[in-house]
Image (cartoon, grey):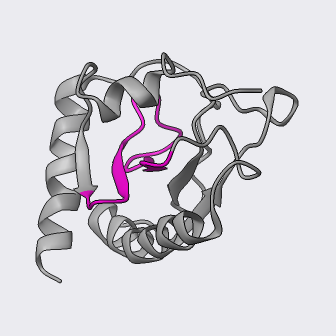
Amino acid sequence: MAYDESNVFAKVLRGEIPCHRIYEDEDTLAFLDIMPRSEGHALVITKEKARDLSDISPQALAKLMAVVQKLAPKIKEAVGADGVLIQQFNGAAAGQTVFHLHIHIIPRKEDEPLKPHAGKIDDQTKLAATAEKIRKKLAQG
């Protein structure tokens, strides 16, 4: 299947839809999931037009995963989590709902259950405050 330029993440990349950005470089963008499974749930997307894991170039995948590796511990620290879940879905049958390759960074706190995948949209003020905490942690190095 061809890449769909009208998917929500393509629109985010073009600035047509706002997001709570936490990190950006020439190859990737990271922002908070508006339907977070936990506080600090972030999405890291490639700027390459790739529907899923089978569409991305090895070079862009390496850059994407390097950003996930860089961000995950900082997000974990920023929200006071005990661990971090890294998730990636390929195809509708696997739970993928946006057909632009993306990696979920989901901070986990012991004894705190995850909210459902694609649950309800969180309060924008709360998301903005969480994004600011994460950006501050990233700025500390």
**Which corner quadrant of the image does residue 34 belong to?**
top left
Looking at this view, name the residue that lies furthest to the right: 93
Tell how many labels: 0
Q: Residue at the location (32% across, 35% down)? A: 13
Quarter of the picture containing the C terminus is: bottom left
Give x and y (percent) for residue 64.
49, 64
Q: Which residues are magenta?
A: 24-48
Looking at this view, name the residue that lies furthest to the bottom: 141
Residue placed most toward the observer, 140 or 67: 67
Q: As drawn, is 137 to the left or to the right of 33?
A: left
Q: Residue at the location (53% across, 41% down)? A: 49
| Above or below: residue 5 compared with residue 52 | above
Give x and y (percent) for residue 131.
22, 48
Q: Residue at the location (56% across, 71% down)? A: 59
Q: As drawn, is 75 to the left or to the right of 35?
A: left
Q: Residue at the location (66% across, 25% down)? A: 97
Residue placed most toward the observer, 47 or 118: 47
Give x and y (percent) for residue 68.
47, 67
Give x and y (percent) for residue 8.
45, 22
Quarter of the picture containing the N terminus is: top right
Check residue 130 for magenta coloring.
Answer: no
Q: As drawn, is 52 to the left or to the right of 69?
A: right
